[in-house]
């Protein structure tokens, strides 16, 4: 095994780390100042090159941060741990900006320091992630059967000019599907224009869609072309069509029927050649039954329906999507892409993702900025993943719409009982209310929440989550007679996690 290089002018620090690593059967090589390290790197053989570098930040022979910069130029993949007795913000920020694996303030707990070095070893041994050209990756990713059905449908529709309705929950990627339909159609050379009808005030939406003439209303200083004119010869994507007000639906129906419309305040009909792709997260059949959506417009839009599955129905795609978004975020921020451990990926696959693919993308961007090391471990994941809420599945409308036998209809089953990480809500939350009388734990939980809300508390989520976690840990420790490792094993969490939670919750 390649050695761990230790750089510190303090002999006692070098001695303590050397002895501790020796007990772990990990070879070491020590230096007193950065110049020695740089000289050694010039002549070292590949088998004696460092696997991890642990360096002090302030030494008489030079700065650990300067050493970090020079080492990273020669060995970009080498994990470097920066130690310092000066635990200030500037030092921490400078260390991470320079590419440090971790920042270790002195005095440190020796056990935690060795654990950190072992994490760095795993990082250096893990196969390097190859550079990925984000621009060359497919516009959509997915191996799940439900996504393969979507891909096949896009392929079948590539030579068609038919109107398409895309259904799916918010954040599931409906606009990506619309862009793919445009890109692979005969209109690919024309414009793709997208508009979220729910994001524009209702009194402005008509002008956005159809344009207006000068003087048509207060503030109309000049003529303006609407989205239908802008999309002429291409594709117009109408997102969240279910929120469109009723009188505007009538104007949209006319355009779909004869391809002509009037600008607001205009008197001349304008012809347009546009393929319309609509999308919604709502059940349009129900909206029609309630009288909120025109039935004739519904049938005009619902020629072909594509249902985009939520992320919880395609969990096997989460690993590849996660690594793709980490690469994408790193490229956008101009930093090295972070790696994610299999254990962390497994936690993501257990998460319900109420925000779907968009939420996963945001989490990956958060991890790129906030994860303390290049290797993302379970403890680095954001709080909503580590302590998920009870999320009910969202029932979806009928999927598919048979047109000349091209697609089959299927009924999505009703939403199942609320789950937390795959377990029923009652089983997941019951430890929170073990001290409550009676069996109706939900009423007890509701009573606690209502009491906190009535007192004007704005930290109800954090408070009840802390009680939940504290109750679980205390119960497990009582069961194992205080043995933390056994308690962590019983709870299904890591030793480091239970230690961190005990400290955070003040259970020492």
Image (cartoon, grey):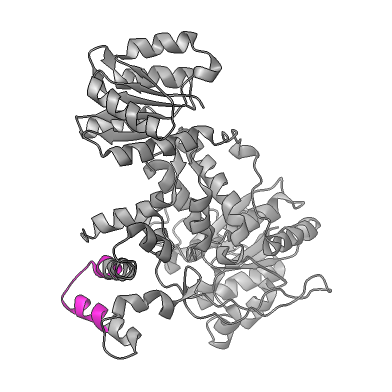
Q: Is residue 463 visible?
A: yes
Give how far across and how far down residue 335 sits, in percent: 45, 33
- Residue at position x 63%, y 51% from top? 192
Give how far across and how far down residue 65 sits, in percent: 31, 22
Above or below 69: residue 471: below
Magenta stretch: residue 460 in it?
Answer: yes
Rendered image quadrant of residue 161:
bottom right
| Closer to us: 7 or 100 | 7
| Closer to us: 392 or 473 | 473
Tally the marks.
Answer: 0
- Residue at position x 32%, y 24% from top? 55
Rendered image quadrant of residue 10:
top left
Above or below 407: residue 337: above
- Residue at position x 40%, y 17% from top? 70
Q: Is residue 100 visible?
A: no
Q: Residue furthest left?
A: 455
Q: Residue furthest front?
A: 23
Above or below 283: residue 269: above
Give how far across and how far down residue 347 sits, in percent: 48, 58
- Residue at position x 45%, y 13% from top? 41
Looking at the rendering, the stretch of residues picked out in magenta corresponds to 447-465
Chief SS of the magenta region: helix
Quadrant containing the C terminus is bottom left
Rendered image quadrant of residue 104:
top left
Q: Residue furthest right?
A: 404
Please state if 190 lies on the left or on the right of 175 as rendered: right
Q: Residue furthest bottom?
A: 438
| Closer to us: 230 or 79 | 79
Magenta stretch: residue 6 in it?
Answer: no
Please state if 80 lies on the left or on the right of 432 as rendered: right
Give how far across and how far down residue 40 sits, in percent: 43, 11
């Amino acid at each position: 095994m390649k050695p761990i290089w230790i750089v510190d002018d303090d002999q006692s620090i070098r001695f303590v780390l050397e002895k501790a690593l020796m007990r772990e059967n990990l070879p070491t090589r020590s230096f007193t100042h950065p110049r020695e390290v740089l000289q050694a790197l010039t002549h070292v053989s590949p088998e004696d090159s460092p696997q991890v570098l642990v360096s002090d930040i302030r030494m008489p022979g030079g700065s650990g941060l300067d050493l970090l910069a020079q080492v990273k130029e020669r060995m970009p993949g080498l994990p470097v741990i920066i130690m310092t007795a000066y635990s200030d913000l500037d030092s921490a920020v400078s260390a991470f900006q320079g590419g440090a694996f971790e920042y270790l303030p002195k005095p440190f707990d020796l056990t935690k320091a060795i654990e950190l070095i072992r994490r760095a070893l795993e990082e250096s041994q893990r196969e390097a992630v190859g550079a990925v050209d984000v621009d060359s990756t497919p516009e959509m990713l997915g191996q799940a059967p439900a996504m393969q059905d979507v891909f096949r449908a896009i392929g079948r529709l590539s030579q068609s000019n038919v109107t398409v309705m895309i259904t799916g929950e918010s954040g599931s990627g409906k606009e990506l599907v619309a862009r793919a339909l445009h890109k692979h159609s005969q209109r690919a050379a024309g414009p793709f224009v997208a508009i979220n009808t729910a994001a524009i005030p209702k009194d402005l939406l008509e002008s956005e869609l159809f344009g207006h003439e000068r003087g048509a209303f207060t503030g109309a200083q000049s003529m303006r072309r609407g989205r239908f004119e802008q999309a002429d010869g291409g594709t117009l994507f109408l997102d969240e069509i279910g929120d469109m007000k009723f009188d505007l639906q009538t104007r949209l129906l006319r355009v779909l029927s004869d391809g002509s419309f009037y600008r607001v305040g205009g008197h001349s009909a304008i012809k347009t050649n546009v393929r319309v792709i609509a999308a919604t997260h709502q059940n349009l059949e129900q909206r029609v039954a309630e009288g909120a959506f025109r039935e004739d417009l519904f049938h005009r839009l619902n020629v072909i329906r594509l249902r985009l599955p939520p992320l919880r129905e395609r969990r096997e795609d989460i690993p590849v999507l996660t690594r793709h978004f980490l690469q994408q975020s790193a490229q956008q921020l101009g930093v090295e892409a972070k790696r994610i451990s299999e254990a962390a990926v497994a936690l993501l696959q257990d998460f319900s993702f109420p925000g779907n693919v968009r939420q996963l993308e945001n989490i990956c961007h958060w991890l790129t900025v906030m994860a303390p090391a290049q290797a993302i471990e379970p403890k680095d994941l954001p709080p909503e993943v580590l302590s998920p809420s009870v999320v009910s599945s969202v029932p979806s409308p009928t999927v598919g719409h048979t047109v000349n036998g091209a697609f089959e209809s299927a009924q999505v089953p009703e939403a199942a009982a609320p789950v937390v990480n795959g377990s029923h809500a009652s089983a997941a939350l019951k430890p929170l209310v073990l001290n409550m009388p009676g069996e109706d734990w939900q009423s007890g939980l509701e009573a606690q929440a209502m009491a906190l809300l009535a007192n004007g508390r704005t930290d109800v989520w954090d408070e009840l989550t802390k009680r939940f976690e504290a109750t679980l840990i205390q119960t497990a420790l009582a069961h194992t007679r205080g043995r933390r490792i056994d308690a962590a094993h019983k709870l299904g969490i890591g030793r480091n996690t239970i230690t961190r939670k005990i400290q955070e919750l003040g259970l020492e």
